[in-house]
Every structure is written in C-alpha cells, then in structure tokens.
Amino acid sequence: SICNFICSNSTCENMTGRQWEVCNDYPSLQAMGWCSNEIGSIQVMSGAWVCYQYPGYRGYQYIMECDCHGGEYRHYREYGCHAQTPQIQSIRRIQH
C-alpha cells in the first residue's frame, strides 16, 4: 500500500528522530505503538490529513496538506495558529 503521511519523533523538530509512516486513520496513536502524545514534525507525502490534539479525534484540529509548506511541517508552530504544543494523539485522512 502507498503510505501518505510520515511523522517524526515527539522531541525532534526538522524531520529528525524516530519516524514512522501512517497509511490509515488512527483514533489513538498510542494504541498503535507511538510512545508519546507529541509529534515534533510532520511530512505529508500526498493528500490531506487532520491531526487532533487528543485520542478519538477530539481537541484542536490541524489540517496538514502536501500542497502547504511543500508538505513539510518542521515545527509544531507550523501546524496552525492555535498550536501551543506538539501534542497530536489521533490522525484522520481527508477524503476527496
């Protein structure tokens, strides 16, 4: 399958640290094995995704698109104007 979304370690900005690819919707990143509730940087390879502050698609929502920033969000402040922390605990694809 084609993976569209790559996330890097909770403590590392600029696409450094532990990385993994996300291909599906995840109501809880911790349940899938991500050991932190924070993500320091994100790269969107294609499409658009919504990242949520809390599990179960709750809390602040951040729209991440491959057409924005070249798909690279190197620091959590690039997630959105209301992003105060790198806390992301669930991710969902935007269907077109």
Image: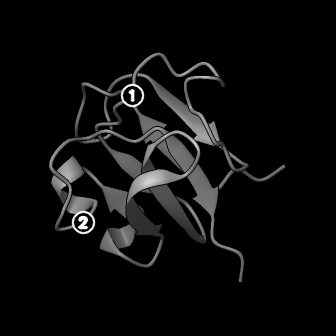
Please tell me how many numbered marks the rendered image carries: 2
Residue that appears at 43% across and 65% down:
64
Q: Is residue 32 above or below residue 39?
A: above
Q: Position of residue 11 (x, y in %)?
A: 25, 24
Q: Is residue 88 above or below residue 31?
A: below
Between 46 and 57, the one nearer to me in the picture: 57
Asked if residue 7 lies left or right of residue 4, the reply is left
Residue designated by label 1: 37
- Does residue 60 show up? yes
Q: CA distance from mark 2 to mark 1?
A: 17 Å
Q: Position of residue 14 (x, y in %)?
A: 24, 42
Q: Amino acid at mark 1?
A: Asn
Mark with earlier residue (2, 1): 1
* Residue farthest along the bottom direction in this orientation: 96
- Residue 75 appearing in the image: no
Tell me where residue 28 appears, x and y as whole percent. 60, 34
The picture places residue 10, in percent across and down from the top left corner, at: 32, 28
- Residue located at (53% from left, 44% from top): 90
Q: Measuring 64% from the left and 42% from the top, which residue is drawn there?
A: 27
Residue 59 shown left or right of residue 34 in the figure: left
Identity, as a three-letter code, of the amino acid under mark 2: Gly
Mark 1, secondary structure of its residue = loop
